[in-house]
Image (cartoon, helix red, strand yellow):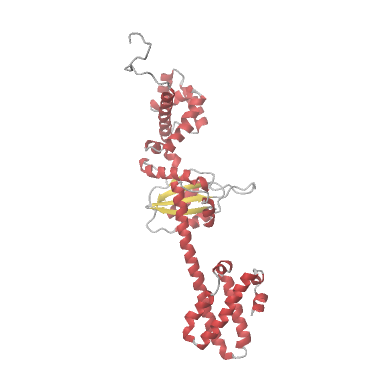
Amino acid sequence: MMRALDDRLPWYRTMPPSRRSAVGLVAQSGITSFIAWHEDPEAQPWIAADVFAAAPRELLRSVSLQQTLQLIRTVVSVFEERIGDADPAMREPILRYSREIAFAAADVYARAAESRGLWDARLEALVVDSILTGEHDDELPSRSAALGWHGRGECAVLVGVAPRMLDVDVVRRKARHAGCDVLIGVQGTRLVVVIGREAPSEDEREPEPIEFLAIAAQLAEGFGEGHLVLGPAVPGITDAAKSAKAALAGFAVADAWRRTPRPVRADDLLPERALAGDPLARQQLVRTVYQPLRDHSSDLLATLACYLDTGRSLEATARELFVHPNTVRYRLKRISEIIGWDATGAREALALHTAIILGAIHDASRERAQRPPQPSPHASPGKGTVGG
C-alpha cells in the first residue's frame, strides 16, 4: 500500500517524513475501517468518519481536498487489484465503502472551510473597526495579509449605506475586476470598504492604475441607495484611519450639498465638513488655500477676498481695489495656478470663501496668543509707585 502511494503520488514523495507517516496512518485506518464495516455494514456512517479522526489537525492544512481524493482513489485501486480481482463479489462492497469515505472527506473539508470562513469574517470586522477608530497597532498589516490583502501601495476608504441584503461577493468580484483588494465591514447602517492597490510597477509598459473614484463607481452596485463618500488616498493600510475619518465626516454632511455626486470625494465636501466642526477639514482648507496665498502675495489674497465679497463681480472688485478688470482676471488666474481652485465656479468659490474666513480666524487667534499680557486697569499699584 505505502509503495503504491509513493509510486503514484508525486506530492506524497516530497512530503516530510512526519507528514508521510500521518498520511500512511490515515490509509491504514481506512483499511481497518473497511474490514470493520464489511463485518457490520450498519456501522458504516461512524466508521467512515473515524478514518479521518486519527489524522493530526495540521495534516488538513498541508493536504488539499484534491490530494485527499487522489489518496482515496489510490487506496481503492490497490484494493480492487488485490482483493477485487481475487474475489469479484468484493467489488461492490469496495465501491460502496469508497463512496462513503469520499463523502466523509468532503464533510471534513467543508466543516474546516466553514470554520475558516467564520474566523475570517470576524477578523475582517476587527480590522475594519480598528481602521475606523484609529486604534490599530503594528499587527494591522499582518492581520490584513491573513485576509488576502496584497496591497502595498495607496489605499482609500469608501463609506456608504449598507443594502438590505448585503452580497459581499458582488463587491469582491467588482474589486477583482478593478485589480484591487478590499476589506469589508458593516457599521450599523453603514457599509465600509477599504480599497487597496499594489504599488505601480517600474515597468513603463505597465498600465496606469485606475483612479480610486473610478473604482468606487464600480463598487457602487454593492451599496444601498444613498450617498457614497470616498476618503482621500493614503500611502498604505497603516494610514487608512486618516482616509476613514475624512470619509465618515463627509458621509455625515453629504445631505447638505443639494447635488452631491455618487460617489463623491470627501475633499469635495470640505466646506460642509468645516461648517460641521470637522477639524481635519478646517486645517486642510487653511493649509491648502489660505496659507499659500498669504505667503505668496497679499495682493492675491486681498483680490480673492474682495472678489468673493462682491458676488464674483470683476468690475466691482476692480473698482474697490482701484485696478483694471484685466488685473483682476490675471490675479484670479494666478490664484488658480497656485492653489488649484477656480474662484469663478460657484462650488469652488464656496470652499475658497470658507477657507479665507477660517484663515482669518486662525491668524487672529494666533496673534492674540502671541500678544504679551496687558496689566489690568483695576490692579492695585505695586511698591514704589507715586500716590500709593
Residue at (45%, 34%) from the top-left corner? 285
Q: Which residue lies furthest to the front in this view?
A: 383
| Depicted 214 relative to depicted 20: above or below | above
| Depicted 186 relative to depicted 266: above or below | below
In the displayed structure, does residue 184 sit left or right of residue 71?
Answer: left
User: In terms of image quadrants, where is residue 86?
Assistant: bottom right
Q: Position of residue 315 (x, y in %)?
A: 42, 22
In the displayed structure, does residue 384 sit left or right of residue 115?
Answer: left
Residue at (54%, 50%) from the top-left corner? 197
Q: Where is residue 381 in the image (x, y as percent from the top left)?
A: 35, 14
Residue 265 shows up from this direction: no
| Depicted 193 relative to depicted 57: above or below | above
Q: Where is residue 109 in the image (x, y as percent from the top left)?
A: 51, 70
**Image quadrant occupied by the N terminus:** bottom right
Q: Residue furthest left?
A: 378
In the displayed structure, does residue 48 sit left or right of residue 347?
Answer: right
**Image quadrant occupied by the C terminus:** top left
Q: How many labels does the image show?
A: 0
Foreground pick, 8 / 320? 8
Q: Which residue lies furthest to the top in this view?
A: 386
Q: Where is residue 138 in the image (x, y as percent from the top left)?
A: 53, 49
| Depicted 6 relative to depicted 89: above or below | above
Residue at (52%, 87%) from the top-left corner? 38
Residue 14 shows up from this direction: yes
Foreground pick, 380 / 182? 380
